[in-house]
Image (cartoon, rainbow, N blue to C red):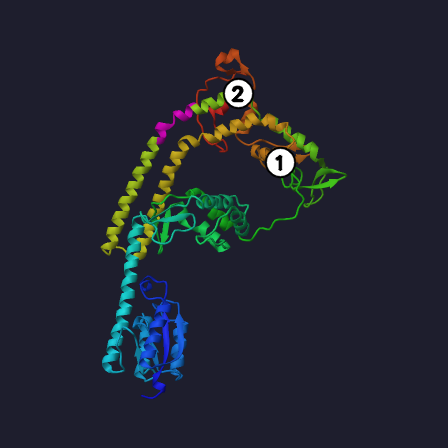
């Protein structure tokens, strides 16, 4: 045998794929192959080390080695096993072709025999085929395992940020450190006041890191906001599954974030405007333009921008506007006696609402059972080839989504059986605090409460044109003094307001359909 025929390349490979986990390390492979080269008195021209799977063609280092073999730099390869060279039909065929054409005259392995004879090439092709079969079969087994876990509501891969893998239950559980920060991420973005960039900085400063302790990139935050797993659904392989893990956010909050993401087509940049407390709050009642604010001789003045043409409205001093706002706030204030009596009525109705909520919960549970039955029938139809895979996945995704909505309703009933009364109680407490706030000097709090009371305030002839929204519009109709004649010690009211209204129906105080005690104790 000539000297050139004894020239070999050493090729070692190891990937992080499941089928390679039991393969010797790169250092061990290299040591064994160098020892084999010494025993066989082989000349090692170069060493190739690759860290990539061989399941698919396209390994750059492997391709470089074959090119150099075709160029005549070496005529043999030293490798740990044939499966190190190829686990796919393209690469395996390429090696056998080079053996057929004489470019490769020898292959040596510590654990496999080969010679360039028809029998040797046949055995080599069988080894390559076994390697490919092993990969294909293993991949199918993994996919089958994944499908079974997903059907059981379990996430089959590494837990996303905010969750941890529980080795005992093979499921994901809440990460007590990161889950609250994930929830804050959704809550902050849902306000519409954050871009992905500013959200990353804000939440990152709070301490949210990736699973390896690294800072999350902007793409990571975008993925988090789009990931259905955080509200209880598992999306995998084009299908939606119902997860058994504990959601971090509600479906409503998740959907709100999706709407905000669609609405934000361009990044929002913070301006460098002066921090005037009433900036952007008022419009001119004559022409509809916004009122701008400017400072003259130590005082702030509100005036019409007159961008639509001539306007006769004059400026208003900021102090004057503040006093007019305070007066409007006083108009929606309630005395402690009146507010406390109304709060007691709401609390009473809350206790009487249990039976209604129970009936609704039972109804939703029945609807969920109907969907479960439909999913069973759908699976049967698919297994009997009555449906195509696309028809099955489309219908299944729709049914699972409908069931998730019902699940959200059940959770909402659990919360709203008491929480639906909280907005009314909060509204009454706001009315109690209105009088105190009207005497405050904190302009920021005054503006915030004023915006809660009404919207789109106008200015005409240096006067505030303003109508409070429901339910604050009802407040001036209620007497502010208890009357012993109307209700005695039980707390009736002056002005002919009945201490026991004929009908009480509590809904959100910020709804157009607001009706509380027939207009907050009907006259």
- Decide whether the magenta segment is chiefly helix, strand or loop: helix
Q: Which labelled disc corresponds to residue 444?
A: 1
Q: Position of residue 452 (x, y in %)?
A: 56, 34
- What secondary structure is marked by label 1? helix
- What secondary structure is marked by label 2? helix
Q: Which of 44 and 114 is in front in this view?
A: 44
Q: Are circles 1 and 2 on residues that touch, CB within 8 Å?
A: no
Q: Nearer the viewer, residue 240 or 80?
A: 80
Residue stretch rendered in magenta on the structure: 348-357
Q: Is residue 451 above or below residue 486?
A: below
Q: In this view, does 49 lie above or below 516?
A: below
| Quarter-of-image position of residue 81 | bottom left
Does residue 348 appear left or right of residue 385 in this picture? right
| Quarter-of-image position of residue 67 | bottom left
- Identify the residue at the far right of this view: 297
Q: Position of residue 53 (x, y in %)?
A: 36, 67
Q: In which quarter of the image is the N terminus?
A: bottom left
Q: Which labelled disc corresponds to residue 338?
A: 2
Q: Where is residue 297 in the image (x, y as percent from the top left)?
A: 77, 39
Q: Residues within 10 Å of mark 2 (few under 14, many from 20)?
A: many
Write the residue at 49% across / 33% down: 512
Q: Position of residue 440 (x, y in %)?
A: 63, 29
Q: How crowded is mark 1: few (under 14 residues within 10 Å), some or many (20 or more)?
A: few
| Quarter-of-image position of residue 10 | bottom left
Is residue 494 in sight in this rendering? Answer: no
Is residue 108 in sight in this rendering? Answer: yes
């Amino acid at each position: 045998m000539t000297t050139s025929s004894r020239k070999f390349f050493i090729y070692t490979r190891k990937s992080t794929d499941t089928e390679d986990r039991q393969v010797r390390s790169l250092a061990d492979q290299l040591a064994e192959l160098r020892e084999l080269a010494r025993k066989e008195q082989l000349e090692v021209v170069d060493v190739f080390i690759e860290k990539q799977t061989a399941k698919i063609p396209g390994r750059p280092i492997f391709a470089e080695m074959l090119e150099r073999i075709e160029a005549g730099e070496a005529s043999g390869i030293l490798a740990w096993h044939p499966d190190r060279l190829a686990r796919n039909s393209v690469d395996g065929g390429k090696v056998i072709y080079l053996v057929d054409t004489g470019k490769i005259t020898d292959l040596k392995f510590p654990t496999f025999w080969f010679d360039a004879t028809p029998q040797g090439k046949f055995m080599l092709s069988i080894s390559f085929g076994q390697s490919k079969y092993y990969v294909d079969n293993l991949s199918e087994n993994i996919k089958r395992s994944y499908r079974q876990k997903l059907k059981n509501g379990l996430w089959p891969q590494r837990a996303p940020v905010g969750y941890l893998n529980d080795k005992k239950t093979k499921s994901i559980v809440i990460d007590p450190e990161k889950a609250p920060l994930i929830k804050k991420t959704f809550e902050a973005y849902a306000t519409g006041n954050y871009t992905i960039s500013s959200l990353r900085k804000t939440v990152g400063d709070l301490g949210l890191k990736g699973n390896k302790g690294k800072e999350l990139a902007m793409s990571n935050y975008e993925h988090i906001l789009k990931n259905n797993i955080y509200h209880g659904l598992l999306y995998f392989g084009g299908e939606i599954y119902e997860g058994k893990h504990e959601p971090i956010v509600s479906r409503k909050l998740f959907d709100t974030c999706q709407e905000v993401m669609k609405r934000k087509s361009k990044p929002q940049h913070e301006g460098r405007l002066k921090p005037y407390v009433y900036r952007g709050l008022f419009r001119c009642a004559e022409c509809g333009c916004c009122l701008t604010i400017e400072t003259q001789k130590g005082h702030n003045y509100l005036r019409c921008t007159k961008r639509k043409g001539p306007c006769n409205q004059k400026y208003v001093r900021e102090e004057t506007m503040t006093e007019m706002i305070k007066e409007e706030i006083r108009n929606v204030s309630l005395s402690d006696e009146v507010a406390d009596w109304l709060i007691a009525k709401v609390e009473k109705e809350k206790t009487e609402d249990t039976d209604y909520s129970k009936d609704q919960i039972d109804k939703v549970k029945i609807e969920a059972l109907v969907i479960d039955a439909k999913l069973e029938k759908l699976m049967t139809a698919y297994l009997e080839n009555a449906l195509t895979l696309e028809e099955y996945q489309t219908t299944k995704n729709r049914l699972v989504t409908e069931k998730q909505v019902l699940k959200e309703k059940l959770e909402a009933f659990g919360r709203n059986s008491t929480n639906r009364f909280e907005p009314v109680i909060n509204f009454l407490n706001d009315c109690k605090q209105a009088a105190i706030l009207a005497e405050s000097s904190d302009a920021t709090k005054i503006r915030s409460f004023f915006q809660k009371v009404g919207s789109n305030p106008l200015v005409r002839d240096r006067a505030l044109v303003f109508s409070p929204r429901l339910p604050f519009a009802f407040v001036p109709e209620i007497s502010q003094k208890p009357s012993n004649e109307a209700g005695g010690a039980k707390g009736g009211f002056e002005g002919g307001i009945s201490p026991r209204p004929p009908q009480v129906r509590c809904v959100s105080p910020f709804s157009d359909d607001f009706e509380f005690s027939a207009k907050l104790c009907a006259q």
